[in-house]
Amino acid sequence: MNVPGELRPPGGWGHAGVVAIRKARVLGWTPFQGCAAGDDLIFTGGVEGVKKNGEPKWARPYSQVVVSNAELIAQQELYEREHDRCRVCYGTGNSWSGWSITNGNRYELCRRCSGTGRPIRSDAAVARANEK
Ligand SMILES: [Zn+2]
């Protein structure tokens, strides 16, 4: 099977983090904390710098950015259109399913794309594409 290969969204916070960084509208802003609040995700962050020992640090004042579920889904659909990869497994066809000290990480076939790594287009997305 020819899967496209992993392409993670930049920033390490998945699709929601990409939205948060865009919405912050501050150059160099990155989140250091994310939490769920109902259907929303709230990211707290600031402009990221580096300590003398090489660890990241965030300059005050910190600020918070809310990412709604609708914004998250829109970003996931954008990712799938731009990169032709599944939003859940980032194109690997596998999703993480657990970890143990004896066997390390365990993976299973991605349930969304059934291991193809390709996007599954929603009916709404197909209808929009056909309108163009
Ligand atoms: Zn997948």
Image: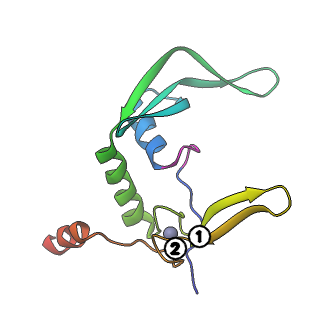
Q: Report the quarter where the N terminus lies.
A: bottom right
Task: Examine the structure image and report whether residue 83 is included in the region drawn in magenta.
Answer: no
The reply to whether the C-beta atoms of the residues labelled 2 and 1 are less than 8 Å apart is yes
Residue type, numbered disc 2: Gly
Q: Is residue 23 left or right of residue 126?
A: right
Q: Which residue is mark 1?
A: 92
Q: Position of residue 115 (x, y in %)?
A: 54, 77
Element type where label 2 sits in the image: loop
Q: Residues within 10 Å of mark 2 (few under 14, many from 20)?
A: many
Q: Position of residue 95 (x, y in %)?
A: 59, 65
Queried on whether the Cβ of the residue with tag 2 lies below 8 angstroms from ligand 1, the answer reads yes
Quarter of the figure with residue 124: bottom left
Q: Which residues are magenta?
A: 10-14
Magenta residues: mostly which secondary structure? loop
Q: Report the quarter where the C terminus lies.
A: bottom left
The residue lying furthest to the top in this view is 61
Q: Residues within 10 Å of mark 1 (few under 14, many from 20)?
A: many
In the image, 28 versus 69, the foreground residue is 69
Residue under the image location 80 percent in, 20 percent down: 52
Q: Which residue is mark 2?
A: 117
